[in-house]
Image (tube, rainbow, N blue to C red):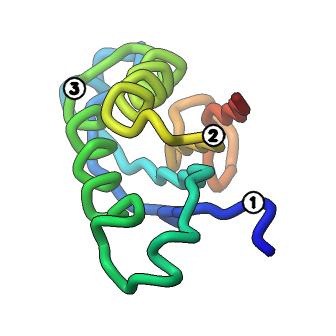
Amino acid sequence: MIIESYIYLDEVRFYAFHGVMPQETQVGGEFLVSLRVGYPIQGAMETDDVADTLNYAELFQLVKQQMDIPSKLLEHVAGRIVKAIHQQFPQVSSIHLRITKKNPPMGADSKGAGVELYIKH
């Protein structure tokens, strides 16, 4: 018996133009997006048919569309991604989203900074 099941994207790399500083919106930067979506995959486990699951390629396209829209705040990008997932995939039971800006302009030596959301229905 499966209690919880997920479809996920792990550290997908994007080049985007998100940020408050002028150089971030002009030059852009690297971002990593990790996404884990609760979704009932039991049907696909039986049928071996992609129509019975959430296609991760479609999930990627949804995230890409939102990452391509420049925003000042990653919080805004995250909110758009969550809203788009709910609209396109109503069977989703949870969303765990992490957006990391690599090399943020904050005067610190770090792997990145960003936002992380966890939503459960």
Seen from the viewer's position, the closer of residues 65 and 89 is 89
- State the image coordinates of residue 64 (x, y, percent, origin top left): 25, 45
Of marks 2 and 3, which one's residue comes earlier in the chain? 3
Marks 2 and 1, how far apart at CA: 9 Å
Q: Residue at x 42, y 48 (%)?
A: 31
Tell me the residue that label 3 is attached to.
Answer: 69
Looking at the image, is 19 positioned above or below residue 108?
above
Residue 77 figure quarter: top left
Label 2–label 3 contact, CB within 8 A: no
Name the residue at 76% across, 70% down.
2
Query: Marks 1 and 3: in contact by CB < 8 Å?
Result: no
Q: Could you tell me which quadrant the C terminus lies in?
A: top right
x and y, in percent, of residue 38 in the image: 62, 51
Q: Position of residue 76 (x, y in %)?
A: 45, 16
Mark 2 and mark 1 residues within 8 Å of each other at the beta carbon: yes
Q: Which residue is mark 1?
A: 4
Residue 93: assigned label? 2
Between 29 and 13, the one nearer to me in the picture: 13
Residue 86 position in % (x across, y down): 44, 28
What amino acid is labelled 3 in the image?
A: Ile
Bin the neighbour count of mark 2 within 10 Å (Cα to Cα): few under 14, some 14-19, many 20 and up: some
Q: Amino acid at mark 1?
A: Glu
Q: Nearer the viewer, mark 3 or mark 1?
A: 1
The one nearer the camera, 87 or 64, is 87
Answer above or below: position of 43 versus 25: below
Q: CA distance from mark 2 to mark 3?
A: 26 Å
**Residue at point 30% right, 37% down?**
67
Residue type at mark 2: give it. Ser
Q: Residues within 10 Å of mark 1 (few under 14, many from 20)?
A: few
Rendered position, 57 above or below 48: above
Q: Secondary structure at mark 3?
A: loop
